[in-house]
Amino acid sequence: MRLAFPKASVSFQNEIHKVRDPNPVQLLHLTLMKHPLLFLLCLTAAWLTVGCGESGPSSSAQNNPPSEERSSSIETNNAPVAEAAFAKVKEPEPKKPEVTGVKTNSTGSWEKLVMHPVHDAQGTLTMEVPLPAQWKLTSRPKPGEPTIEGPNGVKVVDYPLQMFRFTSDPRMQQMYTQAGQRLRPLPNLEALVQQDLAPWAEKRGLKFVKQYEIPEVTRVDKWFNDQLFKAVPGPMQIAAIGTEWESADGEPCFILMHLNEGTSQQLQIWSYYCSVLQADKAHFETARKLFIFGLSNARYNLEPIAAYNRMEAQKAGQSWAAHNARMAQNQAAFEASQRNFVNRSTAAHDALMQNWNARNVASDRTQERFVDTITERTKVVDPASGQQHKVESGYNHYWINSDGKYLSTDKQDYNPNLDEALNNKKWEELKKVNN
């Protein structure tokens, strides 16, 4: 279909001739002014052009690329967008298991980590620690054998708990000495390292390099100690001390000491245990960092802790309801904190629960016997009620009445219920308790 434009009138032609050598712009101006219909048609054509997506150049012609180059440029720039659009409709790939890892050195290589379980001597799961997948843990190694082994010469050996006591009371010193307890005051950290670790290291050709506290491991050790029920609560000092050693040919060695100390008015009880890490020199620093990082982010199983605390609370006559409420609160707080430590790693000491249990039970029993000896008291029990009492030592028979008063005697045939001088009170005979 053709568009027919009206012919120019004579007057319009005369206007054109009045302009000497008219240029195209002048001709266009005169044409539109003389023919309004033509002007409207031009406006309509321009509107249709814009509506169809034609856009004029935004710069001068010399800054615009040729049409062929512009077309090529558009196709190239849109290629990634097209690929992204197709990627949206691809079949979803099956979700892979989440891999936890950490960068192990300055080159940015990654070490895959998995949660390794740690069991006590009874086979109970005590904790899980994130360690490199290629590291292997042995829950109950023989003395001197590695607890952890891995590639690149990685080896961790745990050494037994060392426990000491100290008191300035001569009678208590004698009692502990007779019981085979080691009496020794806790020295400062530098002296402790030189007195206890240096001789062991020298026998293996190692010389001391440096020592430092590892606060992140100290924090975990303190948290664990805080969860344990104590019959006689008292101030405790917890510290994780790292020491580095080196052989004559430059082979490194790392010893981690877990130290704790508790004091009462007359007694100081302190102990430590050590883990020794060795690895090839080129991989030693990476192994040391992984070991420390894992210890500082171990996940403890709260059930063994709860079982231990229930037993201790029952012995001390604590309320079960209050104990369980504390444990529930501790568990909730612990689980909340563990969510922040999902991607961390390290190795853990073996069978901590068993060591803590044995140490606290032995300490409580020894302390009670000692106090009874010093104060000349004997533990007795009321067979009728099961209630225990502490009475003056040195007699064969003890009786208690309904008012809670007791009497002691060495007479075999004496019965206070038949003694009219005792106001006809009912008396029950108490039985001695053997610790």
Image (spheres, rainbow, N blue to C red):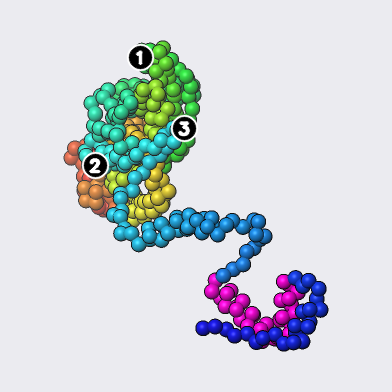
Residue at 30% across, 55% down:
93
For badge 1, the amino acid type reads Arg
In the image, residue 87 sits, relative to residue 113, either above or below, namely: below
| Residue 316 appears anywhere in the view | no
For badge 2, the amino acid type reads Thr
**Of marks 1 and 2, the one in the foreground:** 1
Residue 184 is situated, as x and y percent measured from the top left of the image, at 41, 22
State how far apart marks 2 and 3 are (Cα). 39 Å
In the picture, measured across the screen, residue 8 lies left or right of residue 346, that is right
Q: Nearer the viewer, residue 280 or 40?
A: 40
Q: Nearer the viewer, residue 173 or 91?
A: 91
Q: For numbered disc 1, what is the local secondary structure?
A: loop
Q: Give the residue number, with chain letter if any, for mark 1.
A: 204
In the image, residue 203 sits, relative to residue 142, either above or below, namely: above
**Of marks 2 and 3, the one in the foreground:** 3
Question: Mark 1 vs mark 2: which is more N-terminal?
Answer: 2
State how far apart marks 1 and 3 are (Cα). 31 Å
Q: Give the residue number, with chain letter if any, for mark 2.
A: 124
The circle on residue 106 is 3
Quarter of the rendering occupied by the C terminus: top left
Question: Mark 2 vs mark 3: which is more N-terminal?
Answer: 3
Q: For numbered disc 2, what is the local secondary structure?
A: loop
Residue 97 is situated, as x and y percent measured from the top left of the image, at 30, 49
Residue at 36% across, 44% down:
100
Q: Is residue 30 magenta?
A: yes
Residue at 33% across, 53% down:
324
Q: Is residue 58 magenta?
A: no
Q: Cβ–Cβ below 8 Å for labels 2 and 3?
A: no
Q: Cβ–Cβ below 8 Å for labels 1 and 3?
A: no
Which residues fall within the magenta stretch?
24-53
Q: Quadrant of residue 413?
A: top left
Residue at 33% across, 36% down:
132
